[in-house]
Image (spheres, rainbow, N blue to C red):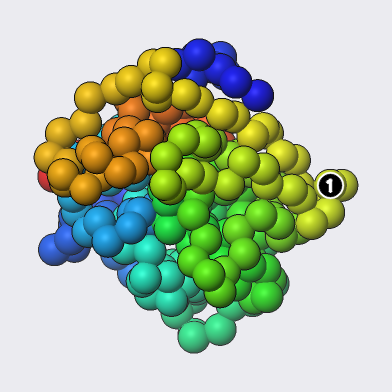
Amino acid sequence: MLLPGLVLSCALALPAFAANGAIEAQPSSKVNYILVGFAGGFVRHDNPHHGPVQLAQRLRREAPAGTYVEVFENRRRKKAFRTVLRLLDSNHDGNLSGDEKSQAHVILFGHSWGGSAVVLLARELHRTGVPVLLTVQVDSIAKPWQQDEVIPDNVEAAVNFYQSHGLIHGRSEIKAEDGSKTQILGNYRFDYREHPVQCEATSWFDRTFTPSHMQSQCDPQLWNKVEDLVRERIELAPTLAAVPGQ
């Protein structure tokens, strides 16, 4: 599906901030939503020019109380997995009960290798019995030993955004492992040769050899759409004051 310029219609106790800018829930606070992003390539989790990081910053400022937001480097997937389990363990006994799993509201998003990390983390959560509300892959690139096409059936909804130009381009289609359990919201192609965007603080290599893939990480229209999809899932969260971001 080609969309010009990607035009789509489509806490309780006050948390503390970790050194990396993540909102850390205090032991006494209830976490209603867990939003995990993955940076692409070798991008750091706190790179202010990177789409997933910018999205996380906006969500930290504006999401309802009880929302945990953190971005990880894609190679830190195991750390992200442990973080999700820790946040779900509301009684801090080191084990997840059926009730704790059933109350999970997890949303995952990522770019490039981070898009693939989204699917791999969803599978790890599936093996643990934890449901996922939404996965978002942006120009998803799987490493040689990874598979990012099939979305596991613990995911309620999934969406894929990709571009098809250059040495590096994202997966063009994702599929549901079980279509009766997972809704694929769409596989949306965008074209930066026709509708280029300007990115800040990019490398010579990216500008020369992977310009379209590079632009997918900073396209404001694309990441605003990702934000809209995330907000649709958390709009029923408690209407308390949002925790201000740093």
Q: Is residue 43 above or below residue 28?
A: above
Q: Is residue 225 above or below residue 73?
A: above
Which residue: 74% across, 48% down?
A: 175
- Report the quarter where the N terminus lies: top right
Observer able to see residue 65: no
Q: Is residue 238 above or below residue 127?
A: above
User: Which picture quadrant has residue 200?
Assistant: top left
Classify 10 Å Cα crowding around label 1: few (below 14), some (14-19), many (20 and above).
few
Observer able to see residue 191: yes
Judged left or right of residue 107, residue 217 is left
> Mark 1: which amino acid?
Gly
Q: What secondary structure is marked by label 1?
A: loop
Between 149 and 179, which is closer to the camera in this rendering?
A: 149
Judged left or right of residue 113, residue 211 is left
Provide residue 25's location: percent of width, then percent of height: 32, 61
Judged left or right of residue 99, residue 212 is left
Between 189 and 186, which is closer to the camera in this rendering?
A: 189
Between 179 and 167, which is closer to the camera in this rendering?
A: 167
Provide residue 67's location: percent of width, then percent of height: 39, 48
Provide residue 131's location: percent of width, then percent of height: 65, 59
Which residue: 52% across, 61% down?
A: 142
Which residue: 62% across, 41% down?
A: 172
What residue sits right under mark 1 in the picture? 179
